[in-house]
Image (cartoon, rainbow, N blue to C red):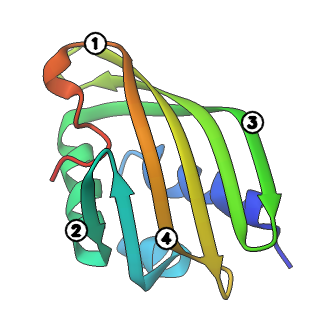
Amino acid sequence: MTSGKELIVALFRDLLEAPVLDLSLVERYVSPDYVQMVDGAILDYSGFIEHLKKQKEIVKSMKVEFLALVQEGEIVFSNHVVKVEKKDGSYLEVKVIAQFTLFENRLIRCDELTRLLLGDKKDQDIGSRR
């Protein structure tokens, strides 16, 4: 059985850091009942897929650096920095504090706060853009 921390690391690698969106991987990692709350925006499963597609349109590469990753039962808490190179050649760094809830080895809920550390202020919504 995969730990929740391992699942979150694999999800970030396979969905966010991957250059192409594979919808079969979204289905494997994320429950159809998924809800994400990020900086006041709420995304359901289809909104999350729209978000991933929009990111792939503007992001050339993305790397997640986990600073802390802690699991308690079905909850995984993460403090991480996302480093992004956009297709226009600009760079972003975003600090993320997130609480992930897992159910039956899939992500069902995410509650996160993001803060733009580096980059254009117009990209402050990179965590929820659709």
- Tell me the element at label 2: helix
Give the mark nearest the N terminus, 3 or 1.
3
Q: Amino acid at mark 3?
A: Ala
Lateral position of residue 79 relative to residue 2, left or right: left
Q: Secondary structure at mark 1?
A: loop
* Amino acid carrying mark 1 in the image: Gly
Q: Is residue 55 visible?
A: yes
Q: Which residue is mark 4?
A: 109
Give the amino acid type for the residue marked by disc 4 in the picture: Arg
Are there few (<14), some (14-19), or many (20+) residues within 10 Å of tag 1?
some
**Disc 2 + disc 3, Cβ < 8 Å:** no
Name the residue tied to disc 2.
47
- Disc assigned to residue 119: 1
Q: Answer with the quarter of the image where residue 6 lies.
A: bottom right
First in sequence: mark 2 vs mark 4: 2
Structural distance between the alpha carbons of marks 2 and 3: 27 Å
Check contact, mark 2 vs mark 4: CB within 8 A: no
Question: As displayed, is residue 83 above or below residue 44?
Answer: above
Q: How many marks?
A: 4
Residue 12 % position (x, y): 55, 51
Say which amino acid is labelled 2.
Gly
Quadrant placement of the N terminus = bottom right
Q: Secondary structure at mark 3?
A: strand
- Distance between mark 2 and mark 4 Cα atoms: 13 Å
- Residue occupying image coordinates x 31% and y 76%: 45
Instruction: For the residues labelled 4 and 1, say whether their Cβ atoms are less than 8 Å apart.
Output: no
- Pointer 2 or 3: first along the chain: 2
| Residue 85 - label | none
The Cα atoms of the two marked residues, 4 and 1, are separated by 28 Å
The tag on residue 68 is 3
Q: What residue occupies the far right of the structure in this picture?
A: 1
Gap between marks 2 and 1, in whole Å? 24 Å
